[in-house]
Image (spheres, grey):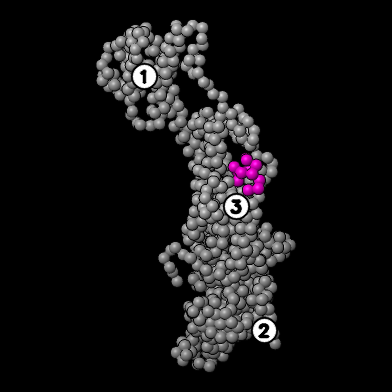
Amino acid sequence: MHSVLIVILKKEVKEMLRDPKILIGMIIAPVLIMGVMSGVMNFVMSSAKEAVLNPNVIIVDYDNSLLSNVVTSSLTSSSGGKVMVIGDMSVSKAIELALKEDFFIVMVIPKGFGYNVSIGRRAIVELYTVMKSLSISEGGASSMPSSIIEFLNSEIVRERIREVAPNIDPEVFLKPISRVEYSVVKGKVINVPPQTVFSVVMSQSVFIPIIIMIIFITAMQFASTSIALEKEYKTLETLLTLPVSRFTILLAKLMSSVMLAVLGSVSFMFAYMYYYTSVTSFGLPTINLSLSDIGLTMTPIGLLLTGLTLFLSMVSSLVLALLIAVFAEDVRSAQTLVGYLYFLMIIPMMVSMFTDVSSLPMLLQIPLYLIPYTYTLASPRAALLENYGFLVIGIVYMVVFSIAVLYIASKFFKSEKVLTAKISFRRSRR
Amino acid sequence: MDFAVEVERLNKFYGKFHALKDVSFNVNSGEIYGLIGPNGAGKTTTLRIIATLLSPSSGVVKVFGMNVVNDADKVRRIISYLPEEAGAYKYLTGYEYLNFMASLYVKDKAEVKKLIEEAELICGLNGRLKDKIGTYSKGMLRRLLVARSLMIRPKLAILDEPTAGLDVIHSQYVRRIIKDYAKRNNVTMIISSHNMLEVEYLCDRVALIHEGRIILEGSPSELKNKFSASNLEEVFSKVVKLA
């Protein structure tokens, strides 16, 4: 039996690797798509970064006072973009110029600006942001002049405080209370604000379910296709009269699907990692931390249990896909039928992205815990928090689930239903 | 006398449809036995039951004394089934396909090689065996599949419409290799066909099957004499009219 299994497995792998649909659709395309996506995102992000850091500004300075000169010179020196200072131009003309010459901001310093500040009155600066594309980069760039004004505001206040109370640090008046934040994770105090911890965990708990889902869908499609193709190519009947147990055939199909899933996962993981790092290197500069930096590391036991959970849920979903494909008449019908299984994944995925299943009412928890993917998706977080009890329960459940499905699938394989059960989504034919 | 195949009061229902009605016949060892009849008569269902693919609703089917339901695994070791319109794995080469099939029957590499050599002789595809099956014509594919089913030297070969859909040249080739092989190796064969001339050429005895019932059985010459017909086609049309 052992050598026969290898013979069939070899055949399955050969077919799989030579089928351009599988090779392109499941291994090459995801990598290419991710590569192109990361390339495009990188380009977009870097040009957005350029626009945020270097907005082109027209300053219309009607005041021409000492203070207005400080404003214009500090803006000129801090901005990497073009800064044009004009003394005698109407606002509407300046806006026209900005539209024509790719200026992003028109800053108007009205007459009396310096004087008002000097006598303790509130001064005004007008900012006109030219929205040409309504894009994110425009939004980002618009914060540039206002941050300079913030800076000027605090500088003027500091100066005033120094005049009134020369012996006291102005910061005491500006920020009488300052905060030092810590987070307590797994009972340990770490020197990181909770928002950062949350952001890191969130980014991981979004990343992991998406990867899991895509890999599972890919592998399930392959598993169901491998059975449906035997029907479509009319090779199943021959296969079933060979001196090979039906269970061995099923096992070989399952094993080749698992191998493809692993192959697909590896290529996809690399592509996604590349995409993820290239996008986040700009997008989330403040969360440039890994889980281990904030004290959230998986112990070897946690890693093992998570791996086992992933493996078992993959096996159970592939067996489920094989079982479903038995009923389909052709590849298209098999893929449509397997498509219905995705709901079983999407529901726990949505839930695990936004909340913790255990925080839901019991009536919702029960059906969710009956879906194996709930454990799959919750396992990384449970492993990080060393909630091993949950992981073990999940593993036990999935072993029971997989064996049950495997049993049902092999029963169907042994009966004549393999040949007679037919669900077709094409128009019926005789 | 022990029969190669014994079919006794075989019935098969697909839901409410009664596909086989008390079908009984025996096939002698070394004999080529033909099941003839129009499409939908029950030929394929009978063959599928003998090949362990379907289970009988009632009745007994034995292959060399082994029950096709209870001893299905043992039966599969000694039979070879060629389904009608069978396909092969199009991404494998002809040679790889034969190698895959042979490896399921014998473990020793030298034995596998021998079987493949036998298949090469039967199919006569020569150099084309190195090409992927996806590139084969229908006739070439059928020759490969016939070779696959005969190379393992089965005690019983079950061939369902072995020449259906083939052109004259390929049909003749396939018929010839089946007849030569059976003579050379004394293999028992059950062949179904709706081509009466083919059956007349190949078979020692035939059974006429019509609407799930065997309505006539005998050697082609016996049947022709009995109905004073020049060929089996005439016999069949006369019998069907009588029935």
Splitting the image into 4 quarters, where does residue B99 fall?
bottom right
Say left or right for A338 vs A380. Answer: left
Q: Position of residue A341 (x, y in %)?
A: 51, 56
Same subunit, labels 1 and 2: the answer reads no
Residue A388 drawn in magenta: yes
Question: What secondary structure characterizes most of the magenta part?
Answer: helix
Name the mark on residue B3. 2
Say left or right for B167 vs B178. Answer: left
Whether label 1 touches label 2, CB < 8 Å: no
Return the chain for callout 2: B
Disc 1 element: strand
Q: Nearer the viewer, mark 1 or mark 2?
A: 1
According to the picture, the residue beneath numbered tag 1 turns out to be A57
Splitting the image into 4 quarters, where does residue B223 fall?
bottom right
Q: Position of residue B134 (x, y in %)?
A: 53, 59
Q: Nearer the viewer, residue A221 or A6?
A: A221
Disc 1 crowd, CA 10 A, few/some/many (<14, 14-19, 20+): many
- Looking at the rendering, the stretch of residues picked out in magenta corresponds to A379-390
Q: CA distance from mark 1 to mark 3?
A: 56 Å
The residue lying at 49 percent from left, 79 percent from top is B16
**Closer to the N terminus: mark 1 or mark 3?**
1
Where is the C terminus of chain A found, in terms of image quarters? bottom left
